[in-house]
Amino acid sequence: MTQFLTAFGDKYLDLVRGLRTLLNEIAEDIIKLASKNVGINLTFERKKGWSEVLSEVKQKKLDFALGTGETKNKKTYGLFTKPYITFPLVIATKNDVSYISKTSDLRGKIVAVGKNYTAHAFLRDTYPNIKLLVVSDSDEALKAVSNNKAYAMIDILPVVAHKIQQLNLSNIKISGDTEYKFEVKSLIRNDYPELVSILNKGIDSIDEKTKNEILSRWLAVKYVKEINYTSLIEVILGFTLLIILIVYYKNIKLKKSYNTLKSTLIDLDKTRENLISSEKMAHVGELVGGVTHEIATPLSVGIMASSYIKEITDDIERLYLDSSMTEQEFKEYIGNVKKISNNIHTSLFRTKDLVNSFKDVAVDQVVEEKRDFNVKLYLDDILLSLKNKLNNRNIQVTVNCDKELIIYNYPGYIAQILFNFINNSLLHAFEEADKGEITISVKLLNSHIELFYSDNGKGVNKDIQEKLFTQYYTTKKNQGGTGLGLFIVKSIVENKLKGNLEFKSEPNAGVQITIIIPN
């Protein structure tokens, strides 16, 4: 058998500190199996750092390196195998940054990346207008964000999620992902094209079942106290996905129906009903985006923390079996497991609360059902569903309501009314950087319910107040306004809830809206 020399840097070798260890171990297992299948022998060497590994491949002291991504610079001196693992590059920021939908949103911002990491090359070559802060590794990149030296950092999803948990950076979250998918490949010295061909054949010889078994072996989790967190996470994710798919399907059907009816229907009542339903689906779509964004970080932290427990459990088991475990090592192990278990517990319960609040509010938007509900708890669920939208605004929302108040009404319509009021305040009452206050009050008056809403924003001039509840009237036509929000609110109050609405406002004195509906 032909023998080749490969290596990986010390940043991949720390058995306690980095998910890059996990990635490299998976890569090593796959390449070992691939080389065995095609009859070549590999000798592995450990180096001090990734830059040293790349340098020795370039100097042809090493035949190839494990676990890297393809970049223009590396292609000048090396060749690449087929990819055998793929992970997304994600964007991490401080908690007060809202969802980042695309990488170009970072133009003009300072973004921290590890030196010679794939994210470094990706941003340098694709987004020259992004200011790069090049640091030694992912730890330093996350600390730069936490210490306000950088606006964001970019690296592989499992690395970022694990590092946030490991470094206890509670002020950092995953705020979005890039269009780049990190394909893990092996880097071959450029005078060995035949080795690339041989290894590619070896990679092709590994079926998906075997590859998944390798991944499962490294990513499988052994849990302390026999709590099956994996099953719990799968249930939560499955339930969330089911709701999202149902809502998405209904939203698509309703949009198609609306586009057809809009050009043919002339009956005002039918048109109003369609508009109300269409807006409901728009709110649900907004809720889906918000809850998906919010649960990504705690779920990732929980999964990565579980992997970390598995690693240190394997280490302590090995020391125990070798009869070399000290009392201090065992105490440190117990301390680490307790700390990480608490983090997992907190992350999962945070996810559970988010999913529960989303479920109640989203289902009520789809199903027009009258039922008993606790008003204070339901208002809290509505605000939790809007957390992602409110996070990046300096707006304080105050709820005044008896904690024990239970009413028999349509919670979906109450939610729809408040979604419109809050969206209107954010769009019309306050500028992006303004500090403001929103107050929501609900109380029972004999056989009627009073819903009071106010903000201390710009207010509304007298000459346009009568037009506010007119269909398609908006002062923000090119800035997100549709002119349907308040028109639909009035339709819901008068036609669905059989109530009445009173609107008061003065310039620079905010708005006050009072709704009275029968209970």
Image (cartoon, helix red, strand yellow):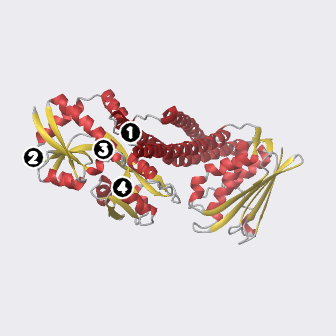
Q: Looking at the image, which is closer to me, 488 or 313? A: 313
- According to the image, label 2 marks what residue? 191
Upstream in the sequence, badge 3 or badge 4?
A: 4
The quadrant of the image that shows the C terminus is: top right
- According to the image, label 3 marks what residue? 183
Q: Measure how far apart labels 4 and 1 are at the Cα level.
A: 26 Å
| Disc 1 packing (10 Å; few <14; some 14–19; many ≥20) | some
Q: Which is in the foreground here, disc 4 or disc 1?
A: 1
Q: Amino acid at mark 2?
A: Asp
Q: Which mark is residue 316?
A: 1
Q: Amino acid at mark 4?
A: Ser
| 172 relative position to 499: left or right | left
Q: Which is in the foreground here, disc 2 or disc 1?
A: 1
Upstream in the sequence, badge 2 or badge 1?
A: 2
Q: Which is in the foreground here, disc 3 or disc 1?
A: 1
Q: Quadrant of residue 308?
A: top left
Q: Which is in the foreground here, disc 2 or disc 4?
A: 4
Which secondary structure lies at badge 3?
strand
Upstream in the sequence, badge 2 or badge 3?
A: 3
Q: Amino acid at mark 3?
A: Glu
- According to the image, label 4 marks what residue? 138
Q: Measure how far apart labels 3 and 4 are at the Cα level.
A: 18 Å
| 310 relative position to 79: left or right | right
| 229 relative position to 428: left or right | left
Report x, y in % for residue 41.
Answer: 14, 34
Q: Measure how far apart labels 2 and 1 are at the Cα level.
A: 44 Å
